[in-house]
Image (spheres, rainbow, N blue to C red):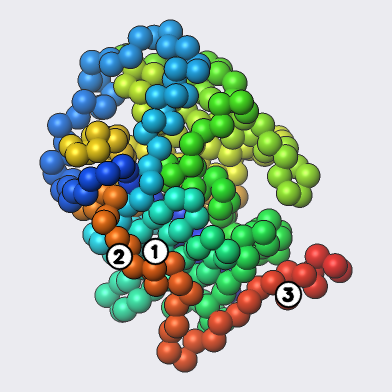
Amino acid sequence: MKRNLHLLFALVSLAAAGALPGCAYMNQWAWRNRPYADRAPCQFPYDLPQDELVAHLNANTLQSWRSTSITIASREHISGLSGMLAVESPRNFRLIASSAFGGEVDFGSNNERFWFWTRRSEQKGIFTARHDQAAHALERFPIPFQPDWLMEVLGVVPLNAADLSLEPGSPARSPVRLVNLVSRRTSPQGDQVTKVTVVDTCHGVIREHALYDATGRIMARAILRGHFQDEITRKVLPSAIDLEWPRTNVHLTLRFRDIEVNPAAIAPQTWALPAIPNTPVIDLEPELARVHEG
């Protein structure tokens, strides 16, 4: 079951994009006019002040999006998955993925709780817990999933300027100029966690999100690639995201073929706990409470 939980949460931690008024479908082959590519001309001055840089990035914060044509690949566990994904700020999202064998994954979240199901799990069931139990879930199960960090990766939560410091980034080939926006946090377990957002100041886009533990080891990393600008909303989105959790040896790539930006309406049942025939709903909260008390 633990191995399948790794896969499930990794598959779920994938996404990007949404926007302001307007609605559009886009095809990835049209995204290849690359004004945000590494060697495209710079759009911003080298010495853009930190407050202006953060304000620019936060102006690109997304509200909602939906894609019914995504592909997922992993060199460790599984490939050839396809499906749909919908995201809505601040905590609504849903991923349903399938293979040639049928449904593989149903993962979702609403304001109160999250859930997950995988067809390949040894223990059959739709597992669910409240968001305030997420930290205990990370302790109890070897799950590579940090919910709050994930929502930042998806671009639906603005950066908190008060928590950030601007630091030099790793060297990169010209004309890309990288800086790090760094914040240090204390996890629910009392451990220090450092969040690093790598920003390309030449083109004004986020290239990477990463979490480091107190020893400086990477806990999770998301690399954003293939940026393009939505013609209607003028928001800049990645067309692919690479995710990795080194401790669990999970590496995944999510590619978006079509994205519906700020759909006029996403059905409320999208954010509801699913009902799968012959599959029980298993609330993790009682077990997590027993482990915590013990």
How far from the left and from the top, in percent, is residue 257? 21, 52
Q: Is residue 16 visible?
A: no
Q: Which amino acid does label 2 sit on?
A: Gly
Q: Which residue is drawn at 50% across and 16% down?
A: 50
Which residue is under mark 1?
95
Residue 42 picture quarter:
top left
Q: Residue at x 47, y 28 (%)?
A: 198
Question: For this rendering, which residue is in front, 190 or 71?
Answer: 190
Q: In which quarter of the image is the C terminus?
A: bottom right
Say whether residue 149 is left or right of residue 81.
right
The disc label shown at residue 287, or none:
3
Q: How far apart are marks 3 and 1 (CA)?
A: 25 Å
Do the CB atoms of the residues marked 3 and 2 lie less than 8 Å apart? no
As helix, strand or loop, the secondary structure at mark 1 comes to: strand
Question: For this rendering, which residue is in front, 150 or 62?
Answer: 62
Do the CB atoms of the residues marked 1 and 2 lie less than 8 Å apart? yes
60 versus 85 height, above or below:
above
1 versus 179 height, above or below:
below
Which residue is under mark 2?
83
How far from the left and from the top, in percent, is residue 143? 59, 59
Q: Can residue 181 be seen in this view?
A: yes
